[in-house]
Amino acid sequence: MDLKDLQNIVIRFRDERDWKKFHNPKDLAVSISIEAGELLEHFQWVGEGEVWKVAENKKKEIAEEMADILIYLLYLADAIGIDMEEEFHRKVKKNAEKYPVEKAKGVAKKYTEL
């Protein structure tokens, strides 16, 4: 199953409920941000030594928040006519140019600092 298949599933779900009228770009972007905040809540006040333990113990809840983010991203892509598969490949190529292996491997710096 590819990204377009996933998008078709959520669009069908949305359309069966007549929710498209609520899916304007601003509200979808807000929803993405809210869901990202809910994802972050799982890690709030967690020390570095506990991050992986929390990730494992709350894996199901974290996965649900990640799925919510993906669903809203697919709704937003549909609303404004973005082909997410195409954009994904374009962005990965752009990042490879900005972060060449020989400069970025093992380095956590922004491309402007490499």
Image (cartoon, rainbow, N blue to C red):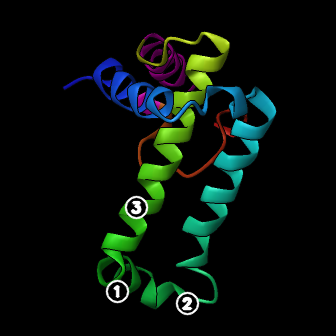
SS at circle 2: loop
State the image coordinates of residue 47 (x, y, percent, origin top left).
55, 90
Residue drawn at 55 percent across, 66 percent down: 39
Work out whether residue 17 or residue 98 is closer to the camera in this orientation and state it. Answer: 17
Residue drawn at 67 percent across, 14 percent down: 80
Q: Is residue 89 magenta?
A: yes
Residue type, numbered disc 1: Lys
Residue drawn at 69 percent across, 37 percent down: 28
Question: Which residues make up the magenta segment?
Answer: 86-102
Residue 77 visible to the viewer:
yes
Quadrant housing residue 49:
bottom left
The main secondary structure of the magenta stretch is helix
Residue type, numbered disc 3: Glu
Quarter of the N terminus within the rendering: top left
Q: Is residue 108 magenta?
A: no
Mark sitting earlier along the chain (1/2): 2
Q: Which mark is residue 53?
A: 1
State the image coordinates of residue 55 (x, y, percent, origin top left).
37, 76
- The residue where tag 2 is placed is 47
Mark sitting earlier along the chain (2/3): 2
State the image coordinates of residue 99 (x, y, percent, origin top left).
52, 29
- The residue where tag 3 is placed is 64
Label 2 vs label 3, nearer the camera: 3
Gap between marks 2 and 3, in whole Å? 23 Å
Work out whether residue 68 or residue 56 is closer to the camera in this orientation and state it. Answer: 68
